[in-house]
Amino acid sequence: MMMTMLAVVMALSGVVALILRLLSSHIRKYAAGGVCLSTARLDGKTALITGANCGIGRETALDLASRGARVILACRDIEKGEETAAEIRRRVGGAQVEVRELDLADTCSIRAFAQRFLREVNHLHILINNAGVMMCPYMKTADGFEMHLGVNHLGHFLLTYLLIGLLKRSAPARVVVVSSLAHYFGWIRFHDLHSQGSYNSGLAYCQSKLANVLFTRELSHRLTGSNVTVNTLHPGTVRSELVRHSTVMSLLFTLFSMFLKTPREGAQTSIYCAVAEELHSISGKHFSDCAPASIAPQGRCDETARKLWDVSCELLGIEWD
Ligand SMILES: NC(=O)c1ccc[n+]([C@@H]2O[C@H](COP(=O)([O-])OP(=O)(O)OC[C@H]3O[C@@H](n4cnc5c(N)ncnc54)[C@H](OP(=O)(O)O)[C@@H]3O)[C@@H](O)[C@H]2O)c1
C-alpha cells in the first residue's frame, strides 16, 4: 500500500515537473510582464537612484546609463556600489556612472549626501526613490524611526525635500517612487507609526509602501505647474535580495523562481516612468507592467495624504509648504 502511494506521488511529481518544463517558456514570458519600449535618449541628463547596488536599482541604473545619462548610484555600502559601477562601465561603453554614500536610515547621512550633491551637481532630471527594506526584525533608524517607515518613507521624504529645489531648477524633471502592490494591505497607524505597541514585519512593510503612494499623491498636488512630475509604481514580484530578512519568503522565492521576474524585468516600470515620452506631463499616478495601475482606496485619500505629510515633516523637523 505504502509503496503504491509512493509510486503515485512520484509519478504525479514527474508529470507536474514535465508540464512545467514544457510550459516553462510560456510561464517565463508571462512572468516577465511589461517592457519599456521607449527608445528615449538621456544625453545631458542626470539621474539619481537610491539603493542602486543590486536588484531593481542596479538594472535601472544600467539602462539609464546605456541611454546616455549621467547616473549617480546612492548606496549605503560604497564598496558594493563601486562594484556595480564597474560592472555598468564594463557593459556600457562611455557610461557616466558615479557612486555616492547615502544611508537612508540616518538623517545626518541624508543631509550630508544632499549638501555635497547640491555643491557638486548642477542638474537633476530624474530622481528614483528605489531603495527599500522588507520584513526585517524590529529595528530603529539612527533617529529612532521604525526601520521600514524610516528607510522606505521618511528617508526618501527628506531626500526629496532636500533636492526638490534642484529638480525644479532642472525641469522638466521626474521623481519616480518605487512602491509595491503591498500598499493594498497597508494602513497608516497614526496612533503607533513606529509599531512600538505591536510589531508585525509584513504589516510594517505594507504601511511604508502605502506611505510611498500617499507621499506621491500629496507631492504631485504640490508640484502642479512646476514641470516636475512624480509617479509611483509596483515593479512586480522580483527575484532580488529584498527577502533577505525572511526565511519563509526566501524559500518561497526560491521554490517559485520560475514565476518571478528577473531584476531586469522588474526594472522595466521604473525605467518606463523615468523615460517614457507619453508620461512627460503625467503626475500622481501609479503604474505596473509599464501601464497605469489602480491604487487601493486607502491610497486615494487626500486627507490621509495631507496628515501623513504633516506628521512626516514634524518627525523630520522640516517645513515643506
Ligand atoms: N523584489 C520585489 O518583489 C519587490 C516587489 C515590490 C516592490 N519592491 C520594491 O522595489 C525596491 C527595490 O527592491 P529590490 O527588490 O531591488 O531589493 P534589493 O535587491 O534588496 O535592493 C534594495 C536596495 O535598497 C538598499 N537599501 C536598503 N536599506 C538602505 C538604506 N538604509 N540606505 C540606503 N540604501 C538602502 C539596499 O542596499 P544594501 O545592498 O546595502 O542592503 C539595496 O541596494 C524596494 O523599494 C522594494 O520595496 C520590490
Image: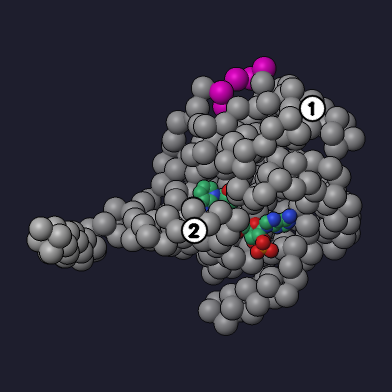
Q: Is residue 299 magenta?
A: yes
Q: Is residue 171 left or right of residue 118?
A: left
For the residues carrying marks 2 and 1, which lies nearer the camera in this image? Answer: 2
Q: Quadrant location of the C terminus?
A: top right
Residue 66 in the image, given as x and y percentages of width and height? 54, 69
User: Residue shown at 86%/30% (left/top)?
Assistant: 314
Residue 1 in the image, given as x and y percentages of width and height? 10, 58
SS for callout 1? helix
Q: Is residue 15 left or right of residue 38?
A: left
Residue 208 in the image, given as x and y percentages of width and height? 64, 38
Q: Is residue 100 magenta?
A: no
Q: Is residue 140 left or right of residue 34?
A: right
User: Residue shown at 85%/63% (left/top)?
Assistant: 120
Amino acid type shown at disc 2: Ser
| Residue closest to the eye, 52 or 17 | 17
Residue named by callout 1: 311
User: Residue shown at 60%/56% (left/top)?
Assistant: 245
Closer to the chain start, of discs 2 and 1, is 2
Disc 2 from disc 1: Cα separation: 34 Å
Q: Answer above or below: position of 233 versus 299.
A: below
**Magenta segment range?**
298-303
SS for callout 2? helix
User: Residue shown at 59%/78% (left/top)?
Assistant: 87
Q: Answer above or below: position of 185 versus 25.
A: above
Q: Estimate how packed mark 2 is, as few (under 14), some (14 to 19) or many (20 or more) residues with alpha carbons within 10 Å.
A: some
- The image quadrant where one finds ligand 1 is bottom right
Residue 79 in the image, given as x and y percentages of width and height? 73, 75
Which of the labelled discs sits on residue 250, or is there none? Answer: 2
